[in-house]
Amino acid sequence: MNPVSNRTGASSAAEHAFAPFIRILGKGKTGTRSLNQGEAQQAFGMILRGEVEPLQIGAFLMLLRVKEESPDELAGFVQACRAHMEIPPQALKADLDWSSYAGKKHQHPWYILSLLLLAQAGHRVFIHGSAGHTPGRLYTEDAMRQLGLPIASNWTEVGQQLDASNLSYLSLAHFCCPLEELMQLRPLLGLRSPVNTLSRMINPLNARASVQSIFHPAYARLHQEADRILEQPRSIVFKGDSGEIEVKPQADTRLYLLDNQQAQEMLLPRSIAKRIESVVTPDVESIKALWRDSVHNQYGLDATLATTAAALLVLCPDINLEAAQLQATELWQNRDTAGLL
């Protein structure tokens, strides 16, 4: 991209093709409106193709941040990403799409044990994420690498890993590099942007079921409505620990389920009444210890079982919350502890 200063001399001769999208979002209290789905797809497609100046990208993302994204905008952004990303082989399929973009800050990444339980139960779980954009957090890619779990560098390896173990992680950088670059703008902008939301919804393998976590409860309906527009068959959204897909046992958790265009809301009651202190540094050694039964950790066990139950709810259309909880407990009791070295 050329520096903005190189273009200022020509700015009076012709308006930049991206300027109308900024104008739609930035005309003030009475003139501003949301982009429609087609406009959102067109605008974000231009960004992904490198047709937009850095100054315009910052303005666009922060105007959206202040206004807050609409479901139509999110759906259009996701469609642009799907059109621009490296397309996986048509035969490559997953049962569950698991997005992981936040990193753990306050607790160990117990959700990794949920991933193992689901994989051992025969569900093909594909995880995609990004790392490093927020200091002081333990990201899924790093945690899985330390645990010796399958990390892919391309779609071929994803297919091989899913066939071998029902589990595979692929970094966003390997299938949609321009979106990864936008993700890394957070330290520069100082705030989350719509990129942090839309990346969770890409579902690159078009899995029939998806699970997503949010930072703020208000975003649950936004995710659900965007999933409805995108015609996602089944999805579940909830506020997870540190923004990752992990139920917090010390808090009541509202689960927002979308089943073939029909929205449902369920309450998963807390299992731990007292407040749990944050860990000093999230690590994987505690994960290994709980999986192997060498150290008991009630918080970790409850987080694992509740997260597994939430995933089973969206994977299995014919079960209710109570049945999902019972199945999660059975999976834990019958787990193969050799599955984590």
Image (cartoon, helix red, strand yellow):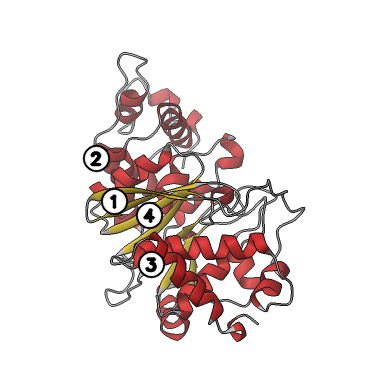
Q: Nearer the viewer, residue 184 or 269?
A: 269
Give the crowd class for mark 3: few <14, some 14-19, many >=20 residues within 10 Å.
many
Amino acid found under the numbered disc labelled 3? Leu
Mark 1 element type: helix
Q: Nearer the viewer, mark 3 or mark 4?
A: 4
Give the crowd class for mark 1: few <14, some 14-19, many >=20 residues within 10 Å.
many
Give the crowd class for mark 4: few <14, some 14-19, many >=20 residues within 10 Å.
many
- Residue 308 locus on image (x, y percent): 48, 65
**Outermost residue, top side:** 30
Amino acid found under the numbered disc labelled 4? Ile
- Residue 329 locus on image (x, y percent): 51, 71
Residue at position x 49%, y 39% in the image: 216
Residue bearing mark 2: 37
Q: Are marks 3 and 4 in contact (CB under 8 Å)?
A: no
Residue bearing mark 3: 96
Q: Earlier in the sequence, mark 4 or mark 2?
A: 2
Q: Earlier in the sequence, mark 4 or mark 1?
A: 1
Q: Which mark is residue 236?
A: 4
Q: Nearer the viewer, mark 2 or mark 3?
A: 3
Residue bearing mark 1: 79
Amino acid found under the numbered disc labelled 2? Gln
Amino acid found under the numbered disc labelled 1? Gln
Q: Is residue 306 above or below residue 12?
A: below
State the separation of the CA atoms marked 4 and 2: 22 Å
Q: Earlier in the sequence, mark 1 or mark 3?
A: 1
How many dots with numbers?
4
State the separation of the CA atoms marked 1 and 3: 19 Å
Q: Earlier in the sequence, mark 2 or mark 3?
A: 2
Mark 4 element type: strand
State the separation of the CA atoms marked 2 and 3: 26 Å
Residue at position x 44%, y 25% in the image: 8
Q: Nearer the viewer, residue 238 or 134?
A: 238
